[in-house]
Image (cartoon, grey):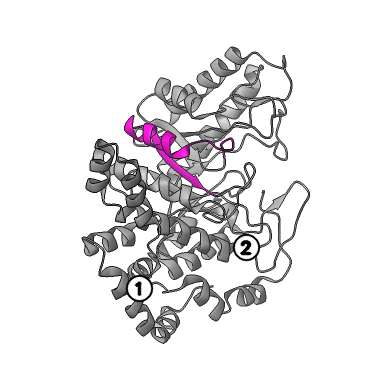
């Protein structure tokens, strides 16, 4: 289904006077307001195709009805999200969960909805039906070169799918690692991974990027072959200019200073982008900003400062994508909330007075530096985000509009209550 823009406008008009009052109140204290609104209007976050269905855990999955039954319906759901927030104009596919059998038709459908295809993601952390060799003991790091070759060929196949769709990046996450001491040789595993990645890198088009993700644990609990940002950075540096490190916010041990990692990767020109989520205990994949919104703001503060220092375009220089699992929520509502949380943190970071902060830092005025950051963080920037959405033709309140339009109920009528697994 597609949303009628006139119905969105009608709902906007009901609360327009209230919005204008709130917007004018906040805008009065914003320096260079037009620049901030322009940046917010241009900022988009990619929606992964696997997030349109209800997620689950190793214990179970509780579907909610009306979920997409095909890639076409997943694209349609991203179209709904983008129609509401005007900040989700791209989709990321995970192969082989979402294979575009007819790339031309799929691409045309996306274009009709104002969407394009972002990074494609390979999958060598699961055995697929009919797969000749198992990844039980790893893929790109496997002790058997034949298994490594199979994994390399899969990644190259994913690149070809991406080329047909107009993608420009391959995202690689490996579950390769070990559960017990002595299970594998660390140096050999790393070298095998590097050699495999070199083959994939060589097969990627000249104008493509190769994003290397990292994770400290799970599904292996003793070691992970690409276990932290340093190992990913080392691989990316050895591969070449097209390769860089992808940061998943959940892929860190508790207490990790992610904002410092981001700052250094950005400084070195090796920050690929983000998989946004939130966590309480580990890699929980919770709704972005639902647990620690202040850390999200601090990350964006480093991003804005670092990108400005390098003259980078905020919207396009690195990749922005959600990677979360909404086990008990309506998937579309959860994604709308996540995009909103990301844009709140970004807007707050735009309000930080960088000159004053740098002066406070140079003077070792710790108290003032904290005050400057928290002044921006404590500003209610939601009216700014709503105004940017309004100017782009979106909803003032995406979740509220989604509910007023009974989107989920209509999707259930169209698709039924029965759903299929998403791969999560």
| Left-right relation of 76 to 55 | left
Which residue sits at x=27%, y=45%? 357
Image point (58%, 13%), residue name: 187
Relative to 413, say whether 139 is above or below.
above
> Dot 2 corresponds to which residue?
68
Residue 423 spot, x, y in % from top left: 67, 48
State the image coordinates of residue 363 (x, y, percent, origin top left): 25, 37
Q: How many marks?
A: 2
Q: CA distance from mark 2 to mark 1?
A: 28 Å
Residue displayed at 56% across by 60% down? 74
What element does badge 2 sit on?
A: loop
What residue would you read off at disc 1? 390
Residue 380, above or below 92: below
Q: 10 Å neighbourhood of mark 1: few (<14), some, or many (≥20)?
A: many
Is residue 270 rendered magenta in the image? yes
Image quadrant of residue 141? top right
- Give coordinates of residue 321: x percent, y percent: 47, 49
Q: Nearer the viewer, residue 346 or 69?
A: 346
Which quadrant holds the N terminus?
bottom right
Q: Which residues are magenta?
A: 251-277
């Amino acid at each position: 289904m597609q949303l009628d823009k006139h119905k969105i406008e009608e709902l906007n008009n009901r609360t327009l006077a209230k919005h204008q009052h709130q917007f004018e109140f906040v805008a009065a204290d914003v320096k260079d307001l037009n620049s901030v609104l322009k940046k917010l209007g241009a900022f988009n976050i990619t929606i992964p195709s696997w997030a349109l269905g209800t997620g689950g855990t190793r214990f179970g999955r509780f579907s909610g009805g009306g979920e997409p039954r095909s890639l076409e319906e997943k694209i349609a759901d991203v179209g709904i999200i983008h129609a509401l927030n005007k900040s989700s104009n791209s989709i990321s596919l995970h192969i082989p969960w979402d294979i575009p059998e007819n790339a031309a038709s799929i691409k045309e459908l996306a274009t009709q909805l104002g969407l394009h295809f972002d990074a494609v993601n390979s999958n060598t952390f699961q055995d697929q039906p009919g797969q000749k060799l198992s990844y039980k003991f790893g893929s790109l790091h496997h002790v058997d070169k034949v298994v490594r070759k199979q994994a390399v060929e899969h990644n190259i196949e994913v690149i070809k799918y991406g080329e047909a769709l107009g993608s420009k990046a391959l995202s690689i996450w490996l579950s390769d690692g070990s559960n017990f001491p002595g299970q594998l040789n660390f140096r050999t595993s790393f070298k095998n991974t590097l050699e495999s990645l070199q083959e994939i890198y060589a097969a990627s088009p000249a104008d493509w990027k190769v994003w290397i993700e990292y994770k400290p644990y799970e599904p292996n609990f003793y070691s992970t072959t690409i276990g932290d940002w340093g190992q990913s950075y080392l691989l990316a540096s050895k591969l070449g200019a097209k390769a860089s490190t992808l940061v998943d916010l959940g892929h860190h041990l508790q207490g990790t200073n992610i904002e410092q990692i981001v700052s250094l990767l950005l400084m070195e020109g090796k920050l690929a982008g983000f998989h946004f989520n939130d966590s309480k205990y580990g890699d929980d994949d919770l709704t972005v900003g639902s647990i620690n919104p202040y850390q999200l703001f601090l990350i964006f503060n480093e991003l804005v400062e670092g990108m400005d220092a390098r003259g980078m375009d905020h919207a396009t220089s690195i990749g922005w994508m959600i990677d979360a699992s909404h086990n008990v929520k309506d998937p579309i509502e959860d994604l709308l909330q996540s995009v909103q949380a990301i844009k709140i943190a970004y807007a707050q970071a735009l309000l930080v007075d960088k000159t004053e902060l740098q002066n406070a830092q140079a003077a070792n005025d710790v108290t003032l530096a904290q005050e400057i950051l928290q002044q921006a963080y404590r500003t209610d920037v939601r009216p700014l985000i709503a105004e940017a959405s309004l100017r782009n033709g979106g909803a003032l309140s995406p979740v509220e509009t989604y509910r007023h339009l009974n989107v989920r109920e209509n999707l259930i009528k169209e698709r039924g209550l029965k759903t299929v697994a998403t791969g999560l």
